[in-house]
Amino acid sequence: MGFSCGIVGLPNSGKSTIFNALTQANSPVAAYPFCTIDPKEGMVAVPDARLDRLAELVMPPTVTPTTLTFVDIAGLVKGAHSGEGLGNRFLSHIREMDAVAHVVRFFDTGKVSHVHDTVDPCRDFDIVQTELLLADLDTVQRRREKSERMALVGDKEVRKELDLLHRLEASLGRGLPASKVVARDQREADVLRELFLLTAKPCFVVANIGEDQVGKAQELVAALEAHLSGWGFPVVPLCGKLEMELAELPPEDRGEFMKDLGIVEMGLGRVVAAGYSVLGLLTFYTTAGTELRAWTVPAGTRAPEAAGRIHTDMERGFIKAEIVPFELFDRHGGEQAVRRAGLARVEGKDYLIADGDVAYFHFRA
């Protein structure tokens, strides 16, 4: 699996439309708040031009792409951190995600009401982000109060985490996400994981533009990008309604419509790229047996750990990895030509898998 991504935003921001566009699902779409109550989940194959090219060269019986899961989560309203709307359920669903895609509405049509009457992307982002910050602040304060009581009765270990909790409380109180607070040791890193803080999760923003705004997307999102400059959240502009309609077309017709509309790439590819970027993920490939397969791992993954994604026995018995970068595989037309040219590298246990590596793992059974 690649990663799981929760789609969040205000009611009527177009979350379900975006979800349908990305997953080709049929989640209900309506022009009123809380059309989505229970989260909808959809798994999609990650678009991968390198995997397509490898399939042309290798011609395996089976090609397996890496996948990612999108979850359409109920709309958030002001006061959600204290239970307003579907706040508590909403927040619990976010805690389970690897990353958050924050949908911000740009389209302006009388057919779809706005919960705050006017379209203001920066304000809408701030409303949702403030709710996440307040929910995290509540979590940290409760943990800090508990830890202080335990410290009073002589628990020396818990005293070590109080510094982290105080730093988190100060950061969140200033409106800064938990991701800005860095763990100073393993104990702090463990506590951060245990807290499951919402603003510690990698996030990117999807700017949901209207059909009449497609040609000026970058100009439109410039103000939002400037507003988010301190957060470091990438912005992906796409037209949810148009993308959903394109996703419903047969592939042969879709290409013609995209050409006519000047759309070079479907939104899924750009959303995946943003997700991989904020999560620090990369893709490597294996061609063992009859299957060509893509795998997703965090940057910095060592070769034995990558082998362990395939099977735990391969990590335990790891001997070496033969590595061919995709560019060499492509340029020479396949594995055999690369080997004849002596270009396949042999790497050991300390090798860090690189994006695009074609890997052949050797291990003791």
Image: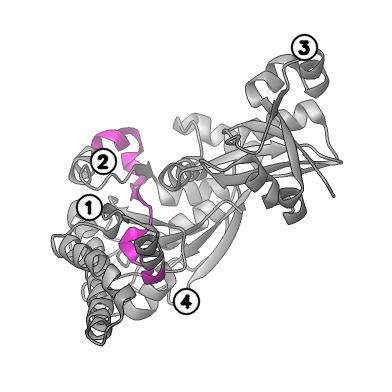
Q: Which residues are magenta?
A: 194-221
Query: Residue under circle 2?
Result: 221
Q: What amino acid type is highlighted by mark number 2? A: Val
Query: Residue under circle 1?
Result: 121
Residue density around tag 3, few if under 14, some if 14–19, many if 20 or more, within 10 Å: few
Q: What amino acid type is highlighted by mark number 4? A: Asp
Disc 2, SS: helix
Of the image marks 2 and 4, the number of the one nearer the N terminus: 4
Lateral position of residue 160 relative to residue 249, left or right: left
Residues under numbered marks 1 and 2 in contact, where contact means CB atoms less than 8 Å apart = yes
Of the image marks 1 and 4, the number of the one nearer the N terminus: 4
Q: Is residue 219 magenta?
A: yes
Disc 1, SS: helix
Q: Which residue lies at the image location 80% right of the left edge and 18% below the top edge?
A: 339
Query: Residue under circle 3?
Result: 341
Question: Residue 10 placed where, x, y %?
Answer: 30, 65
Of the image marks 3 and 2, the number of the one nearer the N terminus: 2
Residue density around tag 2, few if under 14, some if 14–19, many if 20 or more, within 10 Å: many
Of the image marks 1 and 2, the number of the one nearer the N terminus: 1
Q: Which residue lies at the image location 19% right of the left edge and 67% below the top edge?
A: 166
Residues under numbered marks 3 and 2 in contact, where contact means CB atoms less than 8 Å apart = no
Question: Residue 318 placed where, x, y %?
Answer: 74, 44
